[in-house]
Image (cartoon, grey):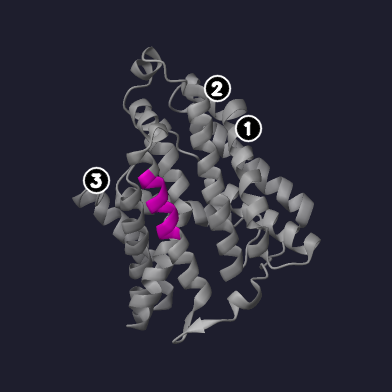
Amino acid sequence: MNALIHGILLGGEYALIACGLSLTFGVMRLVNIAHGDLAVCGAYLALFGSVTLGVPATYVLPLVLPVAFLLGWVLHVTLFERALRAGPLAPVLVTFGLSVVIQNVLTAGVTANPRTLDGGALSLASVDGVSLLRITAFVVAVGVLGGLQLVLSRTAFGRRVRATADDVETARLVGIRVRPLFAAVAGLAVATAALAGVFLGLMGTVDPYAGGLTLIFAFEAVVIGGLGSLWGTLAGGIAIGLTQQLAALWSAGLSVLAVHLLFFAVLTIRPRGLLA
């Protein structure tokens, strides 16, 4: 039972990391190799704000998230948009280069030493032996994914996003301004990645090279859940978390391998994912 509870909570964390990746691929068909590194940037932004202001990292989230949204907007206008026009392979190469740049800039600026974020009283509290911080991360993940799904389903902005995702050229013909729409989606993706990175730093350690493993789990959550499905991303994250925790009961060394085997099994049996 303990493994099941922790697996579900861990799955929420993976889903929060994968949320932005699912959004950018579902709307723009952009595979962002730097997504995990952008999440790590969010953790370091929160660390900088926490140390500067002398408050727990959770208190600086209202400052980190707008900065992350603006960063995503700028990245789309300067890099992603041009890469998407250049062909299907260009975005992969451009975001891979962005990943390398972020890792080297962080290493030069803050060293490669692992860091952890100060969560204040939240990081010390627990409910029946379960960390309140992990429960909070799961609730935030469900809230973010549910909120985005509601926005996409019920608002005019969401209708424009879904129309553009279906057919970019037709969307332009009916008057939708695709460029700022894609930039806003990229901003939302980077903001959710930064939010996930903050929780990653609160519940463990981060370093400039932590984005690679983070990206792998996020990508697997998106594929297992179904490309372009936000609720599928949550289901994929929970499936990964449960697999990792239950496999660890048998052997801790097999927990990561079990996740990759689940990924290949879903690709073989149901390549469109659980909730495509």
Structural crowding at the residue carrying mark 2, measured as other residues with C-alpha within 10 Å and reported as few (<14), some (14–19) or many (≥20)? some
The dominant secondary structure in magenta is helix
The residue to which callout 2 is attached is 82
Q: Earlier in the sequence, mark 3 or mark 2?
A: 2
Give the structural element (helix, strand or loop) at label 1: helix
Residue on which the image places disc 3 = 271
Please name which of the two marks, 3 or 2, marks the residue nearer to the observer: 2
Which residue is disc 1 drawn over? Answer: 74
Amino acid carrying label 2: it is Arg
- Residue located 40% across and 44% down the image: 22
Q: Amino acid at mark 1?
A: Val
Residue sitting farthest toward the left = 269
Query: Which contiguous range is marked in magenta?
Result: 141-150
Element type where label 2 sits in the image: helix
Structural distance between the alpha carbons of marks 3 and 2 = 30 Å
Q: Quadrant of the N terminus?
A: bottom left
- Answer yes or no: is residue 34 visible: no
> Residue placed at 31% from the left, 58% from the top?
235
